[in-house]
Amino acid sequence: MLTVGDKLPNLTVPVQQGSSALPAGETIDLGQTDGKWKILFYWPKDFTFVCPTEIVGYGELKSDFADRDAVLIGASTDTSHVHFAWRKSDEQLANADFPWIADNSKRLAEALGILHPEEGVAYRATFIVDPDNVIQHVTVNGLNVGRNPAETLRVLDALQTDELCPCNWTDGDEVLTPLAA
């Protein structure tokens, strides 16, 4: 599995966004940074139970991520048409207006090393990637436990300080300052 210090794979992958038009071959170039951080999070499958709670949770924080020069990118191993159908079936998911990677080839999930060996779907993996496309944080949950999007935002805040941040640090708290010997 890719981890802190590794580069995000420089791949162009299918993506689906919105619910106003059928997918038409849209893609996203993960090598493109535009000077922004990336929050890339995978869920195992569309039309499941835990996944929509995470997608909606991340979607509710989209503007908070944007305020920190970070783009939100969701992903699963479903097709863009399945993503579209799921968004059309659920107003909360339709409002989660950020790109959803359609990694049905599993090319990106395999490159990241996050495929569940028996189920053939991605683990619940979250990658925080800096503007140089270097992974700065990774968390991976099993298939049945959802994540806390607010924790992802907290970690992004800490990473962006470029300081020593203690346990449970939140934006506005003091950072650690080592004493000179």
Image (cartoon, helix red, strand yellow):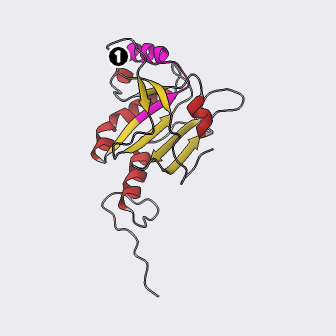
Q: Residues within 10 Å of mark 1 (few under 14, many from 20)?
A: some
Whether residue 99 appears in this view of the structure is yes
Q: Is residue 134 above or below residue 15?
A: below
Quadrant in which residue 33 is drawn: top left
Q: Give the answer, above or below, for where 66 lies relative to 59.
A: below
The residue at the far right in this view is: 118
Please state, as top left, top right, bottom left or bottom right, where the N terminus lies in the image.
top right
The range drawn in magenta is 73-90
Apparent side of residue 114 relative to residue 173 in the rendered image (left or right)? right
Taking the spot 72% from the left edge, 28% from the top edge, the residue there is 118
Give the residue at mark 1: 19
The answer, for residue 143, to whether it is visible in the render is no
Give how far across and how far down residue 179 sits, in percent: 43, 82
- Residue 165 x/y as whole percent: 42, 64
The foreground one among 151 and 99 is 99
Labels in figure, total: 1
Seen at 36% across and 30% down, the residue is 98
167 with respect to 113 (left or right):
left
Seen from this angle, which residue lies furthest bottom?
181
Q: x and y percent of residue 180 in the render?
A: 43, 85
At a point 36% along the width and 33% down the height, the residue shown is: 59
Name the residue located 40 percent from the left edge and 71 percent from the top edge. 176
Secondary structure under badge 1? loop
Residue 86 lies in the magenta-colored region = yes
Amino acid type, callout 1: Ser
Q: Is residue 8 left or right of residue 91?
A: right
Is residue 25 found inside the magenta-colored segment of the image?
no
